[in-house]
Amino acid sequence: MGWTRRPVGWLFDTNVVSAMAAGGLPAAAQGWAATLESERCFISVLTLGEYDKGIANLPDSHAERARIAALRDQIARRFDGRVLPVDAAVARRWGLIAGSVLGRTGVAPPPIDTLIAATAIEHRLYLVSRDVDDLRATGAALFNPWTDEPRRFKLA
C-alpha cells in the first residue's frame, strides 16, 4: 500500500471541508489553501453524503437545517467536476485496507474514513484531514493542515 510516486493533488476530508467553510482553518493553513490550484483539489462523494446524513439527523424545524443544506450545495458547486466517486477500484482498495487493518489490529476501521483514504490512494492524492492518527494505518499519504508544514508536501 505504500507510495511509489508523489501525489498529484489533494483530497479534502469532510472535517477539512467543514473547517474551510466555517473559516476554522489556522491562519497558516488558510494561506496554504489560498494558493492551491482548484483543478488539483477534490472531495469524495462521501463528503456530500456525510452532509446529507447530518441534515437528515436534524428535525425539519431545526434552525440550522437550511443553512447546512445551503452549505452542502455550495460545496457541491465549488467542487463541481471534482467530486470523486466510489468506483470498483476504490471499493477494491478499501477491501484491501480494511482487511489489512483488521488483520493487524483486530479492529475493523471505520468504513467512510477508509473509503475516503482508498479514494486518495487510487487517485494519487494527499488526503487532507485533521484525523491523521485514525487514518495512518490506511497507507494514504496524509496532510494535516493544523500541524503539518505545507512546504514539505510537494505535488508531482
Image (tube, grey):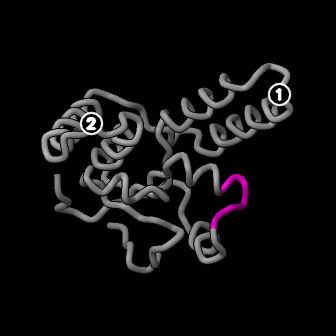
Q: Residue at x 40, y 42 (%)?
A: 113
Q: Residue at x 45, y 56 (%)?
A: 131
> In front: 14, or 104?
104
Place of residue 47 in the rendered image (x, y in percent of width and height, measured from the top left): 53, 38
Q: Is residue 71 above or below residue 137?
A: above
Residue 132 vs residue 122: left or right?
right
Q: Earlier in the sequence, mark 1 or mark 2?
A: 1
Q: Helix, strand, or loop for circle 1?
A: loop
Count of labels shown?
2
Q: Does the magenta portion include 32?
A: no
- Image: 34 above or below 12: below
**Residue occupying the point 64% across, 45% down:** 78
* Location of residue 80 in the rendering, given as x and y in whole percent from the top left corner: 59, 39
- Residue 134 marker: none
Q: Which amino acid, by three-letter code, is at mark 2?
A: Ala
Distance (Cα) linking label 1 and label 2: 34 Å
Image marks 1 and 2: residues in contact by CB distance under 8 Å? no
Residue on which the image places disc 2? 108
Residue 28 x/y as whole percent:
60, 77
Q: Nearer the viewer, residue 11 or 105?
A: 105
The amino acid marked with disc number 1 is His
State the extent of the magenta-drawn residues as a range: 20-25
Q: Is residue 86 left or right of residue 77?
A: left
Q: Give the side of residue 146 with respect to residue 124, left or right.
A: right
Report the residue marked by disc 1.
62
